[in-house]
Image: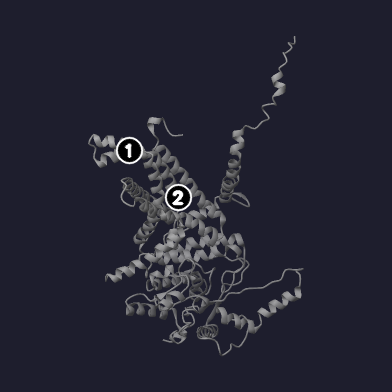
Amino acid sequence: MAVEAPPTPAATVAPPRRRRIPPAVLLIAPSVIFMALLLGWPVIQGVLQAFRDEQGFTLEFVNRMVQDPYFWPAVRNTLLLIVVMIPLQFALAIAMALMLRSNPRLHKVHFFVWAIPLALSDLAAGLVWLSIFNDRGYLNSALSWFGLQGASWLAYDNQTSMFICVLIAELWRATSLVLIIVVAGLQGIPKDYDEAAQVFGATFWQRLRHVTLPLLKPSLQVALILRTILAFQTFAVAQALTGQNFPLVVGETYRWYTGLQNPNVAAALALVILVVSMLTSVFYLRALRDKNQGGLR
Amino acid sequence: MDVNDLTYEGYLAWAKAAKQGAGRPVFGMPAGPKGLHHRFYQGFLLPSFTGGQITTFRNQDAVAGWDYMQELWSAMSPASTNYDYMQEPLARGEVLVAWDHVARLVHAPADKPDDWLMVPAPRGPKGRGYMLIIAGMALPKNGKDRDLAEKAIRALTEPASQIETLRSNAFFPVVQTELPADLTGAIALEAAAVRRQQRSAGALLALPPVGLGAKEGEVSQIFKNCFQQICLETRPIQQVLDTQATQLNTILKALNVPCWAPDPISTKCEVA
C-alpha cells in the first residue's frame, strides 16, 4: 500500500543540497591545488626518478649513491653538524632572548642587529666567512698582526678546524631564526609567573628551569622542528667555505644533479633528506608532547 | 736536468727539493671542485705510466702511476684542493710550479712573461702523455642557408681566425698553420711549449672521454674519486682501483661506446 507523502513546499524552494560544494572546500581548494601541483607532484616524480629506469623498478641509483666515496662522509658531517649546532644555537638564542627581556639600553638596536643574518642569503654569508677563514683571510692577517703564525683553517687534512669554521659560520647565520621565535614566545608569557616565583625566593636558574622553559615549550618545539629541517638543508655555507672537502648531503645532491648530471641519484639523495627530516619531526613532536594537555595534534 | 724534457721522476724530485728549500710545498695542482685535475690523470699521468686510459685502469702500471701520484701529492701544497684555476695561486705566489689547462694558466705570466717558464708535461715509462680536445662542427640536414653556414664553418677554421682565438683566449690552433712572430708574452710562451710537447720524442696523444654525452661528468668523477681515496685518504691503491673500475664499467656498459686514444679502438670500451 502506498502512502502518499504530504507535499513539502520547502523542498521545492531550496535547491538540492548535495550538489552544492561547501564554502570550506572552496576556501581551501586553492591551497590544496597549489600544494598538489607544487609539492605533491614533484614528490611523486622524485620518488619515481630515484627508483625507476627504462626497465622499471631498480635499486641501481640507490646503489650508486651508497657506493659513492662522498656519501657516508656527507651523512656523517650532516649529522655531526646538527648534533653540535642545534644545542649551541638554542642555548645562544635563549640567552640572547633573556637578555633582551631584561630591557637593557638600546635593546631594540640589539634585536635588530642580531636579526640581520636572517636577511642575508646563505651563499653570501658563506663568502663573508670565507674571506675571514681562508689562508690569506682576515683571521690569519689579524693573527700575523699580533705576531702569531696563521693556519690553513680550511685545508682538507684539517677536518676539525674545517668543521669548526662551518659551525661558526652556520651559528652566526642561523641562530637569529631561533632567536626570533624564542623572543616571540617569551613575549607571550605573562610576567606574573616569574614574579611569583621570585617572591617565593626562587633563584634565576630555578625560575629558568621550572617557569620560563616549560612555558616556552611550544615555541621551542616549533623552533626545533624548523631549525633541524633547515639544518639538514645546510649547503651554501659549507660549499663556499670548503668546496667538496666537507661534503654535506644537500651539497652532494647538488653535485649529482648539476655537476654529474645524474638526476636519478640526486633524487635518491633528496629522498634521504626527506625521510630523515620527517623522522626527526615526528620524534620532536612525540618527545615534546605536552602530557597535561593529552598530546598535541 | 732539462726543464723542457722532464721525466715524472725528475718532476717529483724537483717538487721534493723545492718543498725542502722553500720550507713549504710550492708545487700545486687544480684539485678544487671546479679544477681540471681529472684531465691530468686521464691525459697525462695514466697514459704516461700505462699507455692507456680506460682499458689499463687497474693494471700493475696504473698502480705504479697512482703510487707515484700519492708521493707527488705529499710534496704538493695541500691548499690545492681549493684551487680551480692555477693562474690565481701562481700569480699570488702561493705556488711556484703547477700543471693546468693552458687557458687557465695564461693570466699568471701576463704581466711579466720574462719571469715565467711554460714547459711540456713530463714523460713517463710509456711516453709523454698529453691531452688534446677535439671539437666537431656539424650542420643539420635540410637546414636553411646551407651555403652561409658552410661559409661560417670555413671562416672559423681559417688560420687567421684560429690565430685570433689563440690571441684572445689561449686556445691553440687546430689547423696546420705557421704561428705569427708577434704573439704577446704569455701566448708566445704557451705556443712554444705546446709545439715542443707535440713534437717531442715519445709524445703520446690522449683524448678526453669521447661519445659519453651527459655521462662524461660521471666518468671523470671516477678519476677524481681515485685521487680523493688514494692521495687524500691514503687507502690501498689496488683496492680503490678495483672498486672504481667496477663503477666505471657500470657506466660504460650502459653506454656501449668504442674506446678513444690512447686506448686501442675496440668495439666496446671497458676496464680489463
Tell us which disc is closer to us: 1 or 2. 1
What count of labels does the image hold?
2
Whether A23 is drawn above or below B115: the answer is: above
Which one is nearer the viewer's eye here, B231 or A83? A83
SS for callout 2: helix
> Which residue does the numbered mark 1 point to in the structure image?
A191
Task: Give the camera-side residue of B45 and A80.
Answer: A80
The amino acid at mark 2 is: Leu
Q: Is residue A291 above or below residue B246?
A: above
Residue A59: x %, y % from top left: 54, 50
Marks 1/2 in contact by CB < 8 Å: the verdict is no
Query: Disc 2 marks which residue?
Result: A230
Category of crowding for the residue at label 1, using alpha-carbon neighbours closer than 10 angstroms: few (below 14), some (14–19), many (at least 20): few
Of B175 and A95, nearer the camera is A95
Q: Quadrant of residue B161?
A: bottom right
Tag 1 and tag 2 share a subunit: yes
- Tag 2 or tag 1, which sits nearer the N-term? 1
Q: Residue furthest left?
A: A201
Q: Is residue A295 above or below residue B208?
A: above
Left or right? Give the position of A297 relative to A91. right
* Residue at x 47% of width, y 85% of height: B113
Pinpoint residue B154: horizontal percent, then vertical percent. 69, 79
Q: Identity of the amino acid at label 1?
A: Lys
Q: Quadrant of residue B229?
A: bottom left
